[in-house]
Image (cartoon, coloured by chain):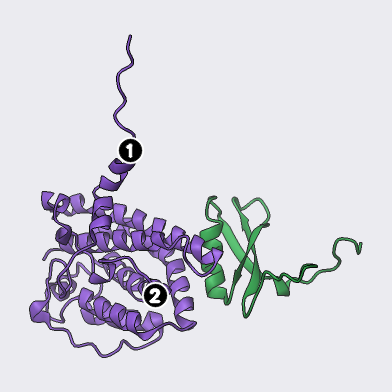
Chain colours: A purple, B green
Amino acid sequence: MSLSDLVLSIADNKQMLGLRYAEWATRAPSLEADIAAAAMGLDDLGHSRVLYGCLEPLGADPRTTERESNAASIRNLPYFDEPWTEWSQFVAANAILDTAFTTMIEACVGGSVEVLQTRLRKMLMEERYHFLHGRSWLRSGIEKAPLERAWREAIEWFGPPDGETAALHTEGKLGMGPAELRARLEEQLETRAPKVEVDWSTWDPIRRRGKRGAVDAHTFGMLRGLEEKKYAPPAAKPTPL
Amino acid sequence: MSKDGYKRVSGDAIEYEVFARKTREEPLRQVGSVVAPDTDLAMAYARATYDEERWCEMAIVRKDDVIRLWQPGEA
């Protein structure tokens, strides 16, 4: 796994987070929360574009043509495989996973790689409002199951204590390694992570997840532009002269 | 509270006024309001709702904290 692989993982996860947020733009508990869901969705989709744009300057773009046909080549966490059915899933993703991605972006900005230091800094300012939104809803109390799932996937996503993310930290390319990322996330959320046992032997270092599976077919079609083509008008016939 | 009993703010929700300006030279002006149970959420809502302009400054104030010298019909 290279730094490019990690950046692609952040980009894919932010893209999926943005899409899932946007799905709640007319379903949140209040009009203000609807607007916030739409705005945060747009932010994260924009952030994913910036992150994809960093792959070429990093020197090795890990994206292959397989991404056009195989949903499992998208590097998203299992949490985003299916649309969320409960508001508590939204809140857990907003508070835990969005903040985990921001923490990793902090690690990129705090590392030695110039393109990441400069291009990702603005995201941290925008993410402050995602964090305030997530933390406030979290404090209002949500169900335990999505919260525990989000914590587990965040800790898995940070990577094993002696893996390649830790090596990137040792090399100075990242400002934090898995242990520091987890501590920073706990500090931000003013809480301790639940006890999580991760079987790193089955963990996929490229997709940064242990669980098999992939994004649902409808969402994958949307990512590929197939949904837009379905609703496009038939090709215009040439006007007779 | 309106004459038909409808109240926009319910439960623990608090109404906040939102102020912003585009340049340092112009004064802050009210651009709208948001309703939220706490200041963190009010900040997130204000930024999400009124972010369509390139403001150089945005601030929120609890509506209850505004001290009114007089109101329409009292001057």
Pick the front one: B67 or A91? A91
The reply to whether callout 2 and callout 1 are in contact (CB within 8 Å) is: no
Host chain of mark 2: A
Label for residue A52? none
Q: Residue flagged by tag 1: what amino acid is it?
A: Ala
Residue B3 lies in quadrant: bottom right
Measured as percent of width and height from the top left, residue A122 is found at 39, 59
Outermost residue to the top: A241
Mark earlier in primary sequence (2, 1)? 2
Which image quarter is the N terminus of chain A in?
bottom left
Pick the front one: A43 or A21? A21
Which numbered disc, 2 or 1, marks the residue closer to the eye? 1
Label for residue A95? 2
* Residue beneath the point at 58% across and 77% down: B37
Both labels 2 and 1 in a single chain:
yes
Taking the image as drawn, is residue A225 in sight? no
How far apart are the alpha carbons under marks 2 and 1? Answer: 37 Å
Query: Which element type, helix, strand or loop, lies under badge 2?
Result: helix
* Residue beneath the point at 35% across and 63% down: A20
